[in-house]
Image (tube, helix red, strand yellow):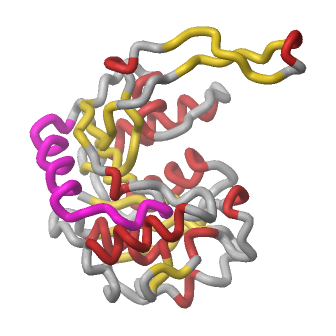
Amino acid sequence: MIGIIPAAGIGQRMGAEIPKQYLQCCGKTILDHSIFALLQDPRVKRVWVAVQGDDQWWPESHFANDSRVEATLGGATRAQSVLAALQAAKASGVTATTLAVVHDAARPALAREVLARLLDVAERTPESGALLALPVRDTVNQAVTSAAQGSLPVSEQTLEREKLWLAQTPQVFQLGQLIRALEAGLAANSALTDESSAMERCGQQPLLVVGSRQAMKVTDPEDLALVEYYLKQLNRSSL
């Protein structure tokens, strides 16, 4: 297995002076914690990290000189960055049937046992693929904009939450299949929100593996305190 981490984004919603993946949590950057999260399972042999061409922070990474980790040039979108990292792995000799474990740069508190649970399922069903996800527990409303309400959103209908899951990462697919799915989706200008959406577009039905609230994605400033709490619970004060 190999790891893929798209880390070329700037995290606009965070409103920080530097990309959010380089913000500090428990003494290390969010990105370093996310890389460590993949490497804590010995089945993940190498990790490719897709970064911006002008990334001035990566050289200071805890893993910048680690032989298991390689930085490669990312793209303007998540899908482009993941594809670039997959192609770099393929160029280095990684075979098409190798499982690629794609993880968000801003999900640092992925627990070892949760990752192991996902990789176990992915190994049993390599051609289907698998991803971490959480069943929705709250009521979910589908909204539309109402001119009568001053363009405010109004609830059009309440969705059946029993059928809804919140996708997380990692998401695991065979390298060759995922490259083809991303290339096809990008060529068609499809909205590829994650790897699962690219595979589903090609007719794939990935397995959903119950994830964890700890594996949250850092998006807004208020997320930092919570993810730091989770990292301390995982004893990640130092890598």
- Total number of numbered labels? 0
| Quadrant housing residue 86 | bottom left
Residue at image point 34% right, 85% down: 237
Residue 118, x across and y down, in percent: 20, 47
Outermost residue, front direction?
Answer: 149
Magenta stretch, residue numbers = 105-126
Residue at image point 32% right, 19% down: 162
102 on left or right of 115:
right
**Magenta region includes residue 48:** no
Quadrant showing the N terminus:
bottom left
Residue 69, x across and y down, in percent: 38, 76
Residue at image point 88% right, 12% down: 147
Nearer the observer, 192 or 69: 192
Task: Determine whether 207 is above or below 9 in the image.
Answer: above
37 on left or right of 115:
right
| Quadrant housing residue 148 | top right
Task: Determine whether 41 is above or below 169 in the image.
Answer: below
Residue 78, x across and y down, in percent: 58, 49
**Magenta region includes residue 106:** yes
